Structures are given as C-alpha cells and as structure tokens.
Image (spheres, rainbow, N blue to C red):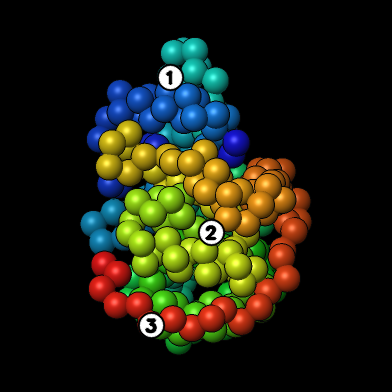
Amino acid sequence: MIDIHTHILPELDDGPSNLAESIEMAYAAEQEGIKTIIATPHHRNGTFYNDGHNIREQVQRVNDLITSEGIAVEVLYGQETRINGDILESLKTGEVITLNNSCYMLVELSPFEVPHYTENLFYKLQLEGYKPIIVHPERNQTFHGKPDKLYSLVERGALVQLTAAGVTGEQGRKIKQFCEQLIEAGLVHFVSSDAHNTSSRRFRLRESYAKITKVFGEEVTQQFQENANSIVSNRPIAAPQTRHPKRKKIFGIF
C-alpha cells in the first residue's frame, strides 16, 4: 500500500517530536502493509512553517535511519499546503512542493469555509499543469452543509482525499456517513491516513480499505489504491463518474 498523506517527519509540525517517534511510525506502517509513505508536513498552519527545501533534507535523514533499522518502508517528500493566494508563486520558488515531484499537490482548506477564490485558484493551478487534491473535506463544515460545492470543484478538475479514520468511524458516526456519501457520489479519488503518531492518530489505512470493500466492493478499493500508485509514478488517475451528493443536515461534527 501507498500512503499519500502523513506527518512522519520529526520536529516540523504536530507530528513526531523526535526521530525515535518517526521510526515507530515507520515500523507501524510496515506492520500494516504500507510500503511507501509520502511525508506531507504542513507548509503554513498557525505556528508551523516548512519550506519545501527543508522537507527534502528531512526526508533523506529519515530514510537513512529507516534503512539502518531494517524497516522496509520508503519515505517520499510532499507537503500539505493551506490554501492561500500565493501558492503558484511559492511553487515556482520551491517553497511549496508537490507529491514526489509529480503534478499532484495536497491543498488544505480550513474546517469552516471554502474561500471565495478557491475555484479560480484551482483553475490557475491546472493551467500550469498541477492537480490540486482537497484533503479531508469530511472535516469542512461548508461541504457538510453544501456538498454541491465539493461536487462543483471536482467537476472542474479538483481531486479529493478522505482520511482513513473518518472512513472507519474513528472521527464519529456523522463524519463516517459523510465519507460514505462522498464515495457513493463519485467524489473521492484517494484515501490516506493523515497519520501523526502511533497512538491517537494512527495509520488505519488497511482498516479503512476493508470498510470500503465491505460497503462499496473490491473494485472501489482497488481504484483508490491504484490512484495512489499513479501519484508516485506521476501518471493520470482514474476518476469515477460523479453525481450530485444527497444533501444532509449535519450538526455538531467537531
């Protein structure tokens, strides 16, 4: 398995506080059957700031230690970028980086809103050859109340990644139902762990794929896994046929 969204690099954000904890995460990933991890520390998120150049250096440092420990996991570089109007310029300078130097990049929205410029920004990114992936939309209150906003972005080329813990129900029944609603509507392209540690925010990727297979069938799971492979090799992904999601009122999700 390939995990395209993790916080495994130490001392950069709200992930591991030291190298030992990073190695614990790598070992846990190996035990779960994950062979490739894309490290995606926050670019700018409150108190965190991680430049793309520094991320590359930290990935090499962690890979060297993982290899010395005999853990059969490879870490690739990436970034989780909070949406802002300067993303295109930051990509040009290398401050913002894509997933494994591919055309794919993770874009994080706040839990509360979808900025008015989102559609235009995504359009400009795609004109420059980038493919924005909206991460954990199941946490966004606007999408819960108005899921057609997500549908509109996907119809215009944006991609979507759910968090494994949301799919499994770890984040609550309402978020789990919303994840299933989005999968049913063809608005999901990837599932990833967003793992931060080996306790409260674990990988759960294998468990989430088992849940998806049970509800939607093996073919859907295989497509999500193949799409993750396509990111690493920078190939086009297969997108399901989209449908307008059913609108459901959901309160108290946070």
The CA distance from mark 3 to mark 2 is: 22 Å
Disc number placed over residue 161 in the picture, else none: 2
Q: Quadrant of residue 110?
A: bottom left
Instruction: Residue type at mark 2: give it.
Output: Gln
- For image coordinates 53% across by 59% down, the residue present is 161
Query: Residue 182: where, in percent of width, then height?
Result: 54, 69
Q: Camera-side residue: 197 or 122?
A: 197
- For image coordinates 58% across by 64% down, the residue present is 183
Instruction: Residue type at mark 3: give it.
Output: Lys
In what element is the residue under mark 3? loop
Of the numbered discs 2 and 1, the one sitting upstream in the chain is 1
Residue that protrudes farthest toward the front in the picture: 214
Task: For marks 3 and 2, give the one nearer the viewer.
Answer: 3
Query: Residue 151: where, in percent of width, then height?
Result: 59, 79
Query: Residue 38: where, in percent of width, then height?
Result: 52, 41
- Decide if residue 15 is on the left or right side of residue 89: left
The CA distance from mark 2 to mark 1 is: 29 Å
> Is residue 122 in view from this perspective?
yes
The answer to whether marks 2 and 1 mark residues whose Cβ atoms lie closer than 8 Å is: no
In what element is the residue under mark 2? strand
Task: For marks 2 and 1, give the one nearer the viewer.
Answer: 2
In what element is the residue under mark 1? helix
Q: Quadrant of the C terminus?
A: bottom left
Residue position marked by numbered label 1 in the rendering: 65
Mark 3 is surrounded, within 10 Å at the Cα level, by few (under 14), some (14 to 19) or many (20 or more) other residues, namely: few
- Decide if residue 72 is on the left or right side of residue 110: right
Mark 1 is surrounded, within 10 Å at the Cα level, by few (under 14), some (14 to 19) or many (20 or more) other residues, namely: some
